[in-house]
Image: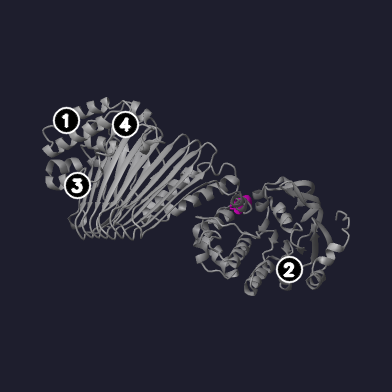
């Protein structure tokens, strides 16, 4: 589904990702872990197409397409979704208007007709229940005045509504209490299907108690320095990241 | 004063024409009022940019362009379809003016509750209780201090009288449609609103132009809000692209009254609103708002003066403008708190969204506070759309143009959301979507 080869990315002239390789197949859940500053968010933002992140080398193939050649909205319409680490507040635009615009863009991309007001409301109410949000969330401006937990749940709501093929969650678990964490985990698990894939970018092992990953990768200094099964997350939890830093960076072959 | 621009002669000729035409029907007090106002206009002339109140708004083109008044309504017939449909239900009270003349056939001035009176000013002048008109007409908008109010008063012939007696509540918004049908026309729309004690109603002025060539509308609205009364006033300005729209709005608020006004500006080449609010009794509340969406070479100017002359009144100002192309916006918000006006609560906000590099904004708050126990705040901000917000929307499938449009609508929503009257709010929603989104689909 997603094939990242020798990806190098810089921001403001500074290199962050250095020749990174990652292979994600349909049906898989990957956890990308690493200390602060290792390049986790850069990876997430670059995959979503943030214009501030400059790709300086490598290639990314997504569902057989050259992902890096696609503008952000094309990536979204092709089923790629990024749950933001810091969701943006948008004054004056209600959550309902925002979701409606996004849903109709997705439907148009798939050649489907726009939903009418009743169908839209029905869909939104169903999805709201999944993230334990009430209807008042729809009339509030996007993320404005939302608590940290509400913002993260709003990202999961958008994910549930847009039903992506590849979801990238950028530290969605950070700063959540246990109830909110469970809601986020449930949202991810619902998306887990043989034809979908999920990348969980996280600093902590905690969410992996609820979402079991197929692969765990450690990102350090812009490279994936270690990849293993779910047991690696527990090892990181126990030992921290320092032992990783002391290991020599392996030269990774393209997968 | 040496700051005047030449160009008053044409208006003097217009005045003389009016005097000849109406001499037999004009009461003496009105003839005298017109003459005094004309003298004042000629003496002052059009202000130049050396005048502090007109520093950023150049009237040279307006002063140099010849405009003429229309003598009779018969000369400007329009079809029913050309007159904008009402905001609310068809049965709502409505007066329509074509090129400054009352058009009875397009109006529906059916009886209002509680003996309220809605009529053309010309009719009121010829039949009415003169003492009532004399007491209010040209007594609120000060023509000695404002040349456009002076010009309006000098050429005063028709307009709207709305008098709502004490305790009378009118639910349906009263709609006034002021339509300009052809190039070169000059009109002096005049609105006199007198709200009796504890009355409550809504009045809407709509300005529409059927021509994209130049014309001149000089509107003056005087609103007297009686004790405990509540008046909501709206202006929806959709003039033609080359129009000059000069508006003077003045409200006098008596004890415990409430007044709100909101001007939505879409049209005109040059639009100026001079708004004055004066608190004459304690406990008054005023909410003043404006939204303007401009592009091309449009120039939009708001000058607001709130005079807290008495204690315990509150005023709120919220003005938001979206500027594109090489548009220019001027905002001057003056709040005067007189020495005895303790417990004044005044707030002012003026924000601009700049969508192009070619736009220019001059925003100036002026707080003149002479009392010590008051709460006065003001804030102004200019900014562009946040790149992070654009990316956020694009990451959800919206193209850049659609993202910018949604964010721009969000910027003005704060003003629209304050509008309590659903049909007006709905109309502005649609007008904004059209204005900001005409080409939003082409890049999908």
Residue lying at 57% horizontally and 70% vertically, measured from the top left = A129
Viewed as shown, does residue A229 lie left or right of B168?
right
User: Pointer 2: residues within 10 angstroms few (<14), some, or many (20+)?
Assistant: some
Give the total of numbered labels: 4
How far across and down, in percent of the image, does residue B1 sit? 29, 30
Q: Which mark is residue A204?
A: 2
Please tell me which of labels 4 and 1 falls first in the chain.
1
- Circles 2 and 1 on the same chain: no
Chain identity of mark 1: B
Count residues near mark 4 (Cα–Cα under 10 Å), then give few for <14, some for 14-19, many for 20+.
Answer: many
SS category of the residue bearing label 1:
helix
Mark 3: secondary structure: helix
**Mark drawn on residue A43:** none
Report whether residue B80 is seen. no
Task: Give me the C-alpha separation between circle 3 and circle 4.
Answer: 26 Å
Q: Is residue A219 visible?
A: yes
* Viewer-side residue, B438 vs B170: B170
Q: Secondary structure at mark 2?
A: loop
Residue at position x 33%, y 61% from top? B343
Which residue, given by chain and number where applicable, does mark 1 sit on? B19
Quadrant of the drawing holding the C terminus of chain A: bottom right
Q: CA distance from mark 3 to mark 2?
A: 73 Å
Mark 2 and 4 residues: CB-CB less than 8 Å, in contact?
Answer: no
Position of B434 compared to B171: left or right?
A: right
Which contiguous range is marked in magenta? A105-112
What residue did someone put label 3 on?
B136
- Write down the quadrant of residue B143 in the picture: top left
Question: Do marks 3 and 2 share a chain?
Answer: no
Looking at the image, tell me whether mark 3 or mark 1 is earlier in sequence order. Answer: 1
**Percent x, y of residue B427:** 40, 49
Q: Position of residue B194 (x, y in %)?
A: 22, 51
């Amino acid at each position: 589904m997603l094939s990242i080869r020798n990806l190098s990315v810089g921001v403001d002239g500074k290199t962050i990702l250095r020749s990174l390789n990652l292979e994600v197949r349909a049906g898989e859940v990957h956890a990308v872990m690493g200390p602060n500053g290792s390049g986790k968010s850069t990876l997430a933002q670059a995959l979503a197409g943030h214009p501030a992140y400059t790709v300086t080398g490598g290639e990314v193939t997504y569902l057989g397409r050259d992902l890096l050649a696609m503008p952000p909205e094309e990536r979204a319409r092709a089923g790629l979704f990024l749950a933001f680490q810091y969701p943006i507040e948008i004054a004056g635009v209600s959550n309902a208007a925002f979701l409606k615009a996004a849903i109709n863009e997705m439907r148009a991309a798939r050649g489907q007709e726009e939903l009418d007001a009743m169908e839209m409301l029905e869909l939104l109410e169903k999805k709201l229940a999944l993230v334990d949000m009430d209807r008042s969330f729809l009339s509030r401006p996007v993320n404005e005045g939302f608590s940290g937990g509400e913002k993260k749940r709003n990202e999961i709501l958008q994910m549930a509504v847009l039903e992506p093929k590849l979801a990238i969650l950028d530290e969605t678990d950070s700063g959540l209490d246990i109830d909110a964490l469970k809601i986020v985990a449930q949202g991810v698990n619902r998306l887990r299907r043989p034809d979908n894939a999920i990348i969980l970018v996280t600093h902590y092992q905690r969410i992996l108690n609820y979402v079991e990953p197929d692969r765990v990768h450690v990102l350090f200094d812009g490279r994936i320095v270690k990849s293993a099964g779910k047991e690696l997350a527990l090892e990181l939890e126990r030992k921290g990241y320092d032992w990783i830093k002391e290991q020599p960076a392996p030269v990774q072959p393209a997968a | 004063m040496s700051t005047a621009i030449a160009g008053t002669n044409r208006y003097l000729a217009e005045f003389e024409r009016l005097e000849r035409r109406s001499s037999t029907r004009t009461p003496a007090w009105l003839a005298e009022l017109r003459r005094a106002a004309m003298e004042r206009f000629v003496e002052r002339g059009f202000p130049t940019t050396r005048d502090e109140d007109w520093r950023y708004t150049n009237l040279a083109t307006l002063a140099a362009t010849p405009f003429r008044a229309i003598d009779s309504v018969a000369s400007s017939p329009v079809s029913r379809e050309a007159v904008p449909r009402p905001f609310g239900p068809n049965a709502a009270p409505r007066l329509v003016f074509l090129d400054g003349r009352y058009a009875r056939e397009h109006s529906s001035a059916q009886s209002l509750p509680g003996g309220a009176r809605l009529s053309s000013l010309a009719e009121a002048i010829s039949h009415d209780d003169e003492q009532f008109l004399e007491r209010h007409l040209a007594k609120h908008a000060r023509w000695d201090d404002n040349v456009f109010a002076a010009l309006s008063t000098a050429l005063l012939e028709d307009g709207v009288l709305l008098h709502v007696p004490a305790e009378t509540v009118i639910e349906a918004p009263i709609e006034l449609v002021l339509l300009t049908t052809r190039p070169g026309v000059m009109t002096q729309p005049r609105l006199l609103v007198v709200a009796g004690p504890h009355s409550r109603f809504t009045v809407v002025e709509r300005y529409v132009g059927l021509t994209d060539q130049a014309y001149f509308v000089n509107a003056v609205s005087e609103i007297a809000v009686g004790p405990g009364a509540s008046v909501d006033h709206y202006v929806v300005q959709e003039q033609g692209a080359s129009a000059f729209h000069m508006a003077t709005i003045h409200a006098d608020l008596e004890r415990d009254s409430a007044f709100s006004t909101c001007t939505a500006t879409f049209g005109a080449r040059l639009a100026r609103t001079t708004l004055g609010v004066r608190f004459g009794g304690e406990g008054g509340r005023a909410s003043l708002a404006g939204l303007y969406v401009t592009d091309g070479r449009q120039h939009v100017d708001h000058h607001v003066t709130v005079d807290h002359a008495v204690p315990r009144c509150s005023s709120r100002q919220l003005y938001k403008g979206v500027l594109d192309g090489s548009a220019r916006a001027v905002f001057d918000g003056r709040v005067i708190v007189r020495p005895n006006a303790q417990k004044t609560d005044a707030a002012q906000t003026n924000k601009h969204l700049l969508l192009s590099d070619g736009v220019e904004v001059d925003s100036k708050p002026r707080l003149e506070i002479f009392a010590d126990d008051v709460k006065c705040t003001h804030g102004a901000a200019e900014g562009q759309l946040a790149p992070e917000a654009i990316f956020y929307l694009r990451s959800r499938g919206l193209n850049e143009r659609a993202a910018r449009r949604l964010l721009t609508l969000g910027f003005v929503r704060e003003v629209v959301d304050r509008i309590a009257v659903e049909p007006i709010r709905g109309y502005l929603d649609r007008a904004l979507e059209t204005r900001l989104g005409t080409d939003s689909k082409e890049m999908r």
